[in-house]
Image: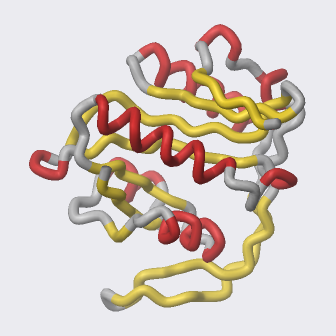
Amino acid sequence: MIEYRILQADEICRELFGHFIRHQIVTKCWRKENGKWIIKDDPFVDDWTEKDYQTLITCLKTTIHTNGFVYAAFYDKKLKGFVSVESEIFGNEQRYCDLSCIHVSEEMRNKGIGRTLFLAAKEWAKQKGAKKLYISAHSAIESQAFYKSMGCVEAEVHNQKHVEAEPYDCQLECSL
């Protein structure tokens, strides 16, 4: 059985991710060319380095310390998925909350964990007064299929911070 709960800053450490497998084999990605979205071959393996884990730990703790939301899924007391949403609301009329990350361990994908985490993020953002989630999302076709299944579309307003940091990510929004 999968247990879902809010994470506290003091429990976020490298050991928390000891049974978490980020690994994703990517073959095709969405790319915007001449104003149109197309699928392109772009094979690579997405996996986290130790430096990536340390950056993630810092970011998740910062999210909590700034009154954001970090929610996790555990199977057999081991972390198997998590989502984070930043507390700041931006985008004027759009009233976005930034879904800063959502990940499910490789062996637990396609079991509804991502959906449950995403829905919890939407509910939290709605309670904070946001109208939409903003997602700077991996462009892999599998990742984009997930977001589309959750009702996400291309964002009306792009957050330049995300566009500059990850130019190949897709900038999405999801109404709450």
Residue at the extreme top? 10
158 relative to 125, above or below:
below
Where does the image place residue 143, in percent across and percent down from the top left?
Answer: 61, 66
Residue 8 is drawn in which quadrant? top right
Q: Nearer the viewer, residue 171 or 117?
A: 117
Q: Which colour scheme is used?
A: secondary structure
Residue 75 falls left or right of residue 59:
right
Q: Which of 133 and 37 is in front in this view?
A: 133
149 relative to 92, above or below:
below
Residue 66 falls left or right of residue 107:
left
Residue 145 is drawn in which quadrant? bottom right
Q: Which of 27 and 83 is in front in this view?
A: 83
Count of marks placed on residues: 0
Quarter of the image with the N terminus in it: top right
Where does the image place residue 135, in percent across and percent down from the top left?
Answer: 42, 54
Where does the image place residue 50, in percent across and percent down from the top left?
Answer: 79, 35
Residue at the extreme left? 93
Where does the image place residue 79, in percent across and percent down from the top left?
Answer: 78, 32
Question: At 45% across and 52% down in the image, what residue appears?
Answer: 165
Question: At 58% across and 30% down in the image, what residue appears?
Answer: 71
121 relative to 107, above or below:
above
Residue 55 is drawn in which quadrant? top right
Residue 123 falls left or right of residue 19:
left
Question: At 34% across and 28% down in the image, what residue appears?
Answer: 87
172 relative to 120, above or below:
below
Question: At 58% across and 22% down in the image, what residue appears?
Answer: 6
